[in-house]
Each structure stands twice: as structure tokens, then as C-alpha cells.
Amino acid sequence: MPPFTLPFEKPVLELEKKLHELESFSKTQEIDVSHEIDRMREKIDATREQIYTNLTAWQKVQVARHPDRPYTLDYIKNMTTDFVEIHGDRIHADDRAIIGGFAKIDGQKVMIIGSQKGRDTKSNLECNFGCAYPEGYRKALRLMKMADKFNVPIITLIDTPGAFPGLESEERHIAEAIAVNLREMFNLRVPVIVAIIGEGGSGGALGIGIGDRILIFEHAYYSVISPEGCAAILFKDRAYADKSAEALKITAQHLIENKLADEIVPEPKGGAHTDPKAAAENLKAALLRNLAELQAKPSEQLMNARYDKFRAMGVFQE
């Protein structure tokens, strides 16, 4: 099955087809065209780099939603050891849209919690396409309080289009579950690092998004509403999603400019989906560096700085 290709990646796809034809010609005709093959590979790399260096906000949203992009369990597999998953909120059920448990990163004990999407219909239905129910946020809070009790730092990985907006969520008080998480995460005495690895959608993301450091992948996004939702409200037409994405200032670069994130984690050339292990190594390095800085600070200082950090968001002067 051919790899999934985004619309703006078509020039790279065409070059890769030509490379494949050239390699087949060389093999079948027994003619050495290695020099031309090397030049074609260099051209592919240069084209991909040029495309990904100049992505629009809407194109970055498309990259963040790429079906081959690594998810939380992929990062857990590639950058941790001794992962022990913990299930259930002890009230209603075990929500597979948010997973978490104790793990080690280079020997450093952490509690890692994150949004989880599926790769096919079956797995997407199991984790509700990454849209958590109230019990998902209550499970996350249970795990965070457990980490706080045992003085273990917390890492949250965000990749969700938003919390599930259906009747079941309303019946089980989704707004209250997210609100409680916001309040309680400010009271955690251990370091908390938040990493946006793909989509950061609305309150669904913010429900596990209060931290001392906010990291975001180069082609991830973080927004109060999806570009399509914004377009439907402002323009009465979802076709204007590209304009909405620009207006919302949702890219990693915009978030840094507006002091809503602290650090951009670089992605492999062509996006995290092209090399999940390299993406995990980049994230691991950023997490360990920030953890070392945060663990050197007293709990009271951490909590006060966390509170001041979020209170300052949205403040501006004309």
C-alpha cells in the first residue's frame, strides 16, 4: 500500500516515482546510473526541505493530523522503558482515549500520560478517535495525584482534536472533569512538562495541559477551536479553514511569539511521520533537559511560577 501523501507533498511524490523508475532501469538494463540516482535523491531531499520550511498554518494542521504520525504509545515505546499502564478512573470506566502509567526515561522515573488515537477503524473506535470522555480526564487526574504522592515528575503528551462533545460526555459532566483538572494541576508539587505532539484541540487538550514547561513539535498546533470549526462560525463555510488557521495563530512559531509555549521540538525532515524514532529522540532530549532544570527548584517555587505563567497568558498592551 503506497504511503499517505498530503496535497502539498505531490512534487516530492513525483520525484520519488522518477527515482524508482531510474533504479528499475538501472537494474533491468544493467547500466550504472548511480550518479544520476544520487542527484535525484539530493533533489528529493532539497524539495522536501523547501516545502516543509515554508508550510502555511493550514498545511501544518494537515501534517499534525497525518495518519502515520507517531502517537503517545509510539513515543512511550521509543523513548521509555519499564512502562506500566494504569487503567480506569475508579468511578465509571477505562477511557482508551487517554492512556498513562509509570515509566523510565534513561533511568529517570516519570508518570507519562497522553492522548491516544488509532491507526484503523477498530483501534479508532476503541479510543474514540482520540476524543476523551470525562472518565479519561478523571483517570489522568488520578494518575497525576499518584505521581504527586510518590514525588514522581509528570509528562503529558497532547494529541487530540478535542474532548468528546456527545450526549454521554454531558451526562457524565465533561466540563466539570476538565475544570477540576485545570484547578488540580496547579496544585501539583512535582514538575509537570506538557508536550503537544500533534493536535492540541480546545479544552480537550487543556485538560492535561497545565505544566511548568509547554513543549510543542515543529509541525504540531494548539488552538481554542479547530480551523474548520472557526470557519463554520466566522465564514459559515468550512472551506475557509485555511484562512481560519492563519487567523487563529495556532502554529508552534505563533505560540512561542505569544508566550503560550516555551520550546519548539524539531521534527525530522518531512515531519515526525517520516522517522518516528528520530522524533522520539528529539522529544526525549528536550524532556530530560527540562526535567533536570525543573527538579532543581523547590516545590513552592514550581507552583508559584506555574500559576504566574498561566495568569500572564493573554495579557497584552497596545
Image (spheres, rainbow, N blue to C red):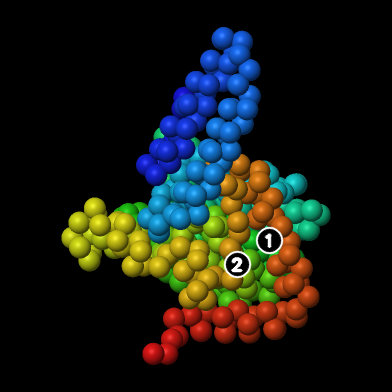
- Of callouts 2 and 1, the N-terminal one: 2
Q: Are marks 2 and 1 in contact (CB under 8 Å)?
A: yes
Residue 172 in the image, given as x and y percentages of width and height: 39, 60
Residue 297 in the image, given as x and y percentages of width and height: 75, 78
Graded by Cα atoms within 10 Å as few (under 14), some (14 to 19) or many (20 or more), the crowding at tag 2 reads many
Residue visible at 52% across and 79% down? 310
Q: Residue furthest right?
A: 107
Q: Secondary structure at mark 2?
A: strand
Disc 2 to disc 1, how far (Cα)?
A: 9 Å
Which residue matches tag 1? 286
Graded by Cα atoms within 10 Å as few (under 14), some (14 to 19) or many (20 or more), the crowding at tag 1 reads some
Q: Residue furthest top?
A: 29
Residue 275: image quadrant is: top right
Q: Residue furthest bottom?
A: 318
Q: Amino acid at mark 2?
A: Glu
Residue visible at 40% across and 68% down? 249
Please tell me whether residue 79 is drawn above or below residue 184 in the rendered image: above
Which residue matches tag 2? 263
